[in-house]
Amino acid sequence: MAVTTRFVALTVITAAAVGVAAWATVLYLGPPRGAPAPPASAATAGANQQGAEARRIKATLFYVAAGGLGLAAAERDVAFAEGPSEQGKRIVEALLDPAPAGLASAIPPGTTLRGLYVGEHGDAYVDFGGTLRSNHPGGSRNEILTVYAIVSALTVNLPAITSVQILIDGHEVDTLAGHVDLRRPLPNARQWMEKGTS
Amino acid sequence: MTSRVTILGLIALLTVAAALPLDAQAPRAAAPYTVITAAGRRDLGAASVGDQEMLRLDEIAALLQLVVREDRAGNALTVSKGTNTVVLSLDQGLASIGGRIVSLPAAPVRDGGRWLVPPDAVSRAFALVAGVRIDLRKASRLIVLGDLRVPRVTVRQEPAGPGTRVTIDISPRAAYTVAQEPRRLLVRIEADGLDVGAISAGGGLVQAITTSEPATVAISLDKGFGSFRASTVPIDAASSRLVIDLMAAGAPPLAGLPRAQPQQPAPPPIIEAPPVDAPASLLPAAMPGIRTLVLDPGHGGDELGTRGSNGTLEKDLTLDVARRLKNLLESRLGIRAILTRDDDRLVPLDERASIANNNKADLFISLHANSSPNTDAKGAEVFYLSLDGLNDEARKMAETPQSKPLATFGGGSREIDLILWDMAQARHLAESSVFAGIIEEELRRRVEMSARAIQQAPFRVLVAANMPAVLVEMAFLSNPQQEAQLATDGFKNGVVQSLYDAILRYRARVEAQAAGRR
């Protein structure tokens, strides 16, 4: 009996904590600090995962073009997920994988994705681990390519996302390498695409 | 039924528990902050909650004419002025302004009937709502409201031979006069207020050193005082140093006293430093238009910038080229050239623009070396700011200087010109683009250009510059051939000569426009 009571209490506390976290996220359109909020219910997440493994979508991802000055588009298979936040995560995860032959990745090796949240105005907040900054080789061209490879991947593939703000370890940052202003969400800018890129 | 009551009770408990960590630490009184406005100084109540310093929201609201409402349903505070609103979360250190999230070091805390907020909320959130420039200087417990000159001033005195030496450092630079009155010297600094740092106690021929409003340092003199000599000593581009040597009565003037550098003739009772926004008088008079230029050597200190495969560091190259350009500009054109850093140290991006703004620079050039994942990338590039990421309303606010009433201490208000400092560059984009175009043409005559030679980008260092501003990437350090080129005097001098010629051309354009208006 005592065990059952404790279990019920724990379940209620967990459910309430999830509710509070979700409520705060919706209210402020921003990520809660620390770990990403847990899914709303284990059952739904399980069902989604099963479906996602079965389905894959084509997404346009962006890599450093020959010449090293612009971004080139490449179509990749990405796991399907429900909703812009979850699908956005799958797309960014695919972008962290090695680049297709003939193109270079604009993302420093070792970069990890911590979370992705989409606000009601279409602003996506993409939270990366600190290596995105600490492993970044610097140079404004390099920084532009990194930032806009991420911004383009999300805005081109997901109409629900109109601009993207990059966070590091859950926090807003000034820049990745001393140039591009990351204090507000950036819309896609086609000028960084190589000519002929869709 | 019982279980529903249990659940509701648990949820209530949980909500209380969530609020507990902050409430558990009762606010303690702390020394007040000082607010400097065009109308004078006043105190702003402060408190400490744990390690976090907080300010009284009601006093800030009165100062900035903000309306504060508590949104119990949303567990938030809304702070608004006109149609501008910021929402402060009571759960965590987050504020939302027009859909944009700003992080704060702490959530608001209730102290009896009033709310306390972290000082950062004033500069990071309320400034945007109130549409006024707010300079928060936590180390000095100072808040500067509006576009005021409030240099930091430190004063120290030390024995110097038979006399006493008083050294006054003023940063950023400001003009000043030294006047002798009976038993005291008054140093009047051309500023709207002083950010007073360390001040030595009296000693030797000095009885006491005090400051008074708006910007005067008073040195009370001992009975034994006879005469003084004041001289200006250059320390760096951003600061002024005034050295006053006090001699005892009857002592042979200056006997045994090490002279402050540089040497100057014996002073008249009143000396005047050159006004800060005029070129040094030894230089040929600059034409109207371009008198002061700020050169910003990218990166520095622990922030190396990018690095070539042979180990060349961007931060070293940018400083080298900036120094060369400064020498050429000052010796040939009589333009005052200020470096945002003249040694290997890290200067925050905001401070780089502040140095240009505080010195009322006419042009801002940030110097960098580039890098790409593809080692074939090569060539110089010129950037000016793009306003990507600003919504239309913010863009309009940024582009149009607005005249707004500012609260004064008497309870009235006066009209002042407001610039949204965070986006000061927006007003200068057209001229920045012209200047970037001229630089691109001049560089092309001497160095290889990238296939994307001139572009707009949302670069952080340019955003707050209140004058035409560009960022120049000289070459790609990631390209081994270009790294080797960058090491040569020939290449560096080519870049310097191109930038010099571009500044000359841009100056001619500004002068022609000025002549056209006359």
Image (spheres, grey):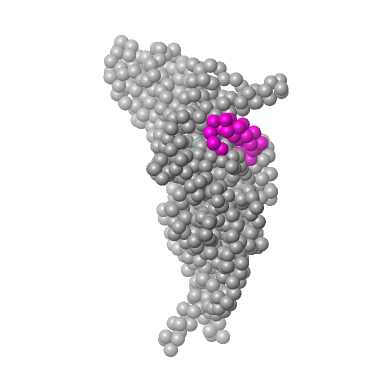
Query: Residue placed farthest to the right in the image?
Result: B517
Percent of width and height locating residue B69: 62, 56
Q: Is residue B419 magenta?
A: no
Of B202 and A195, the residue lying toward us: A195
Q: In this view of the protein, can residue B4 be seen by the observer?
A: yes
Dominant secondary-structure state across the stretch colored magenta: helix
- Residue B76 vertical position relative to residue A70 in the rendered view, above or below: below
Quarter of the rendering occupied by the C terminus of chain B: top right
* Residue found 61% across the figure and 22% down from its top: B288
Q: Does the magenta stretch include residue B431?
A: yes
Quarter of the rendering occupied by the N terminus of chain B: bottom right
- Residue B181 vertical position relative to residue B125 in the rendered view, above or below: above
Of B200 and B337, the residue lying toward us: B337
Query: How many labels sit on residues?
Result: 0
Percent of width and height locating residue B152: 46, 33
- Residue A97 vertical position relative to residue B231 in the rendered view, above or below: below
Residue interval drawn in magenta: B423-449
* Residue found 51% across the figure and 56% down from its top: A105
Going by the image, does A177 lie left or right of B84?
left
Q: In this view of the protein, can residue B468 be seen by the observer?
A: no
Going by the image, does B243 lie left or right of B387?
left
Query: Residue placed farthest to the bottom in the image?
Result: A1
Percent of width and height locating residue A69: 56, 47
Percent of width and height locating residue A14: 49, 75
* Residue found 40% across the figure and 12% down from its top: B265
* Residue found 45% across the figure and 57% down from its top: A109
